[in-house]
Image (cartoon, grey):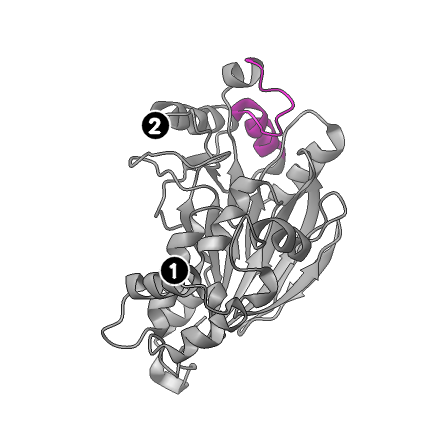
Amino acid sequence: MARIPALQGNGFSQETMLDMMKPKGKFYGVRGSFVIGDTKIGGHTTCHTLQFGRKLIIFDFGSGMIDIGNELMKRYLMPGKTIKDVDVFLNQYVAQGSDIKNLGQALLESGHLNQEEELDLTFMSSHVHGDHLFGAQAFKPIFSPKTKIHMIGGLHCGMNLFEVMQQFNFRPPVFPVPWEYLGSKRDLRVIEPNEHFEIENDLQPIKVWVLPMNHPNGSYGYRFEWCGHVIAVTLDHEHGKDEFDKNIVRLWEGADVVVTEVQYTKKMYEDKRQGYGHITAEAAAQHAIEAKPKRIITTHHDPDADYDTVQEIARTIERHSHIQTTFAVQGMVF
């Protein structure tokens, strides 16, 4: 993130300090499978942030990542410059046949960016299906030398996150800027199933636990523990295999907030969707009964699901489990 003034003596009230110790999040994309035109719930694919004190984690790379990138980019624009100016510069640079190797340096020298602010970001990936990945191409800070990105994700069919992006996202003719010519500095942590690790943070390290889920080509669920709070994130998974069902319960157990995909009603699932890798409201409710989290937020809504269907899914979980359940809307803060 951009630098924030350090805590100084009585510069912050006790209330502010306590507030800083509460994790926060925001949904930028709440659809699964592909982007749709929906202004009521939102049409961007899966992407949300988790904020632990000063540590910002961007979770999954769906098209919602475009809006996060624009918000972050504003932090180091020169006065009078806009996101549109940066967009025009990047497109013109590529269209004019300029040396792609020098794109990052050219952006730095273009006069669009100030000299003070820098971004230090952490990206986490559940899996690498297209709806969780293609927003990275339009994430403007990834082109800037003033951005450092720490990526965390597992293996999928033997490929790590860097290899997938290098071979599919950032490679001509799919995209004109190759991975190796992006201006940002990037490093990768490849996680293993059932791994426990920590992410350094100002107040306390963030403890992370990773477990595999049932989804074609593999997917990973995460459990975050920080300052006495627990958040679980499970995207994407399908019920019905005991080993993976137990993993969901373990990740959700006692969590303050569960952010999870629940893409189907029972009727939708039974109508030729079994095996697609997504869970029903009834199955999610059963996991919740066993795990007893305090709150559930559903996301990764099916592109065919309208407002009433998404609402029905959340109400079904709450009715069966007696656990507060809401559904994510693009732009919603939690």
Nearer to me, 273 or 145: 145
Q: Give amino acid for label 2.
A: Tyr
Q: Is residue 288 magenta?
A: yes
- CA–CA distance between discs 2 and 1? 36 Å
- Name the residue that disc number 1 marks: 91
Is residue 3 visible in the rendered structure shown here?
Answer: no
Amino acid type of the residue that numbered disc 1 sits on in the rendered structure: Asn
Q: Quadrant of residue 214?
A: top right
Quadrant hosting residue 139: bottom left
With 59 as the anchor, is 188 left or right in this view?
Answer: right
The picture quadrant where one finds residue 306 is: top left
Q: Which residues are magenta?
A: 271-290
Q: Nearer the viewer, mark 2 or mark 1?
A: 1
> In this picture, is 248 found above or below 165?
above
Numbered disc 1: secondary structure: helix
Q: Position of residue 308 (x, y in %)?
A: 35, 23
The label on residue 307 is: 2
| Residue 173 belongs to magenta span | no
Q: Tag on residue 5?
A: none
Around disc 1, counting alpha carbons within 10 Å, would you say few (fewer than 14), some (14 to 19), or many (20 or more)? few
Query: Which residue is farthest front?
Result: 97
Q: Position of residue 122 (x, y in %)?
A: 55, 63
* Residue in the picture at 25% in, 77% down: 79
The residue lying at 36 percent from left, 84 percent from top is 10
Q: Quick one: label 2 or label 1, which is nearer the N terminus? A: 1
- Figure quadrant of the N terminus: bottom left
The x, y position of residue 197, in whole percent, is: 70, 61
